[in-house]
Amino acid sequence: MTGRACGVVLAMALALPGCSSPPERAAASNAAPVVSASPSTAGGRPSEAKAVVRPATAAPDPGDPAAVAAAFLRGAIAKDQRAAAAQWDGTPADRQQALAVLAGLSGTVTIGAPVDGDAGMGQRYVTVPFAIGDRHGSALLHRIADGFDSDDPRAHDWRVRTVTFDEEVPVASAGAPETANARYACTDGSVVPARFDNRDGTVALTVGGASVTLRQQPVASGIHYAGAGFELRGKGRRVVLTLPDGATKDCEDHL
């Protein structure tokens, strides 16, 4: 083939619609990373070869429990408590415990396939297995079932209720606090700061400028504290505070 013929063939090849110019290929390779929370196994421990959680700026799909679990873990490991708290539905004390443990871990985060759990009427639970480096555990997520109403605007979103590990993680090495703080914003416009003492099983509240201490009470789920005529009950970030005169405050933790 002559030099002129080769030039014609090369020009035709470059003009084909399937060919990309170097700038186009560079742009494609620099696309923004996304969260990959696709299940890597059908339950059980996830494979580290798949479903790697990559950095992303978008909030997770609240209807995808795997994506929600990934967002919580990623935020906790990065010590971004606000991002992690947005995906949490458990007690403030459990949240602080989970954040403290996860903040002491590092490594690749992988997510396994969600497994449906037992649920009562109007409730839904799933367990999402995960691995962080060589640590394996699972996150229990909860939401209100479709067709059931709730005052909580996020009641139908998947959110993390608890985090557990297959093997005990030394809490002290992760710097877990012996106390946990909450800041309850109430529907009457008041704010009630709370300080939970995990050693003594108490919570100190500041109500109307006065400090009161309530003691933890037996409860099947959620939290229940009582003392000095006050009572604090709740699940996740939402609580009801009953005052000595019987009046109640509906509040939500915004810390």
Image (tube, helix red, strand yellow):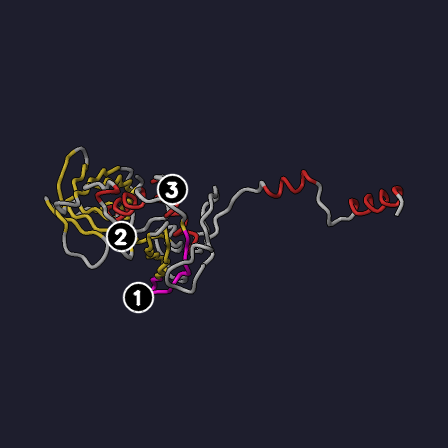
Q: Which residues are the magenta region?
A: 110-124
Q: Which residue is mark 1?
A: 120
Q: CA distance from mark 2 to mark 3?
A: 19 Å
How far across and how far down the image is residue 207, in percent?
Answer: 19, 37
Q: Is 20 in the magenta? A: no
Which one is nearer the viewer's eye here, 164 or 64? 164
Residue 235, numbered label:
2
Q: Secondary structure at mark 1?
A: loop
Give amino acid for label 1. Gly
Q: Is residue 193 left or right of residue 45?
A: left
Q: Secondary structure at mark 2?
A: strand
Q: Is residue 94 left or right of residue 62?
A: left
Q: Is residue 61 left or right of residue 8?
A: left
Q: Main secondary structure of the magenta part?
A: loop
Number of marks drawn: 3
Labels 2 and 1: the sequence-earlier one: 1
Q: Is residue 40 above or below residue 191?
A: below
Labels 1 and 3: the sequence-earlier one: 3
Residue at 45% in and 59% down: 40
Which one is nearer the viewer's eye here, 206 or 243? 206
Residue at 81% in and 44% down: 10
How far across and how far down the image is residue 197, in percent?
Answer: 16, 43
Q: Pointer 2 and pointer 3: residues touching (CB < 8 Å)?
A: no
Residue at 13% in and 41% down: 213
Numbered disc in front, either 2 or 3: 3
Q: Which residue is mark 3?
A: 83
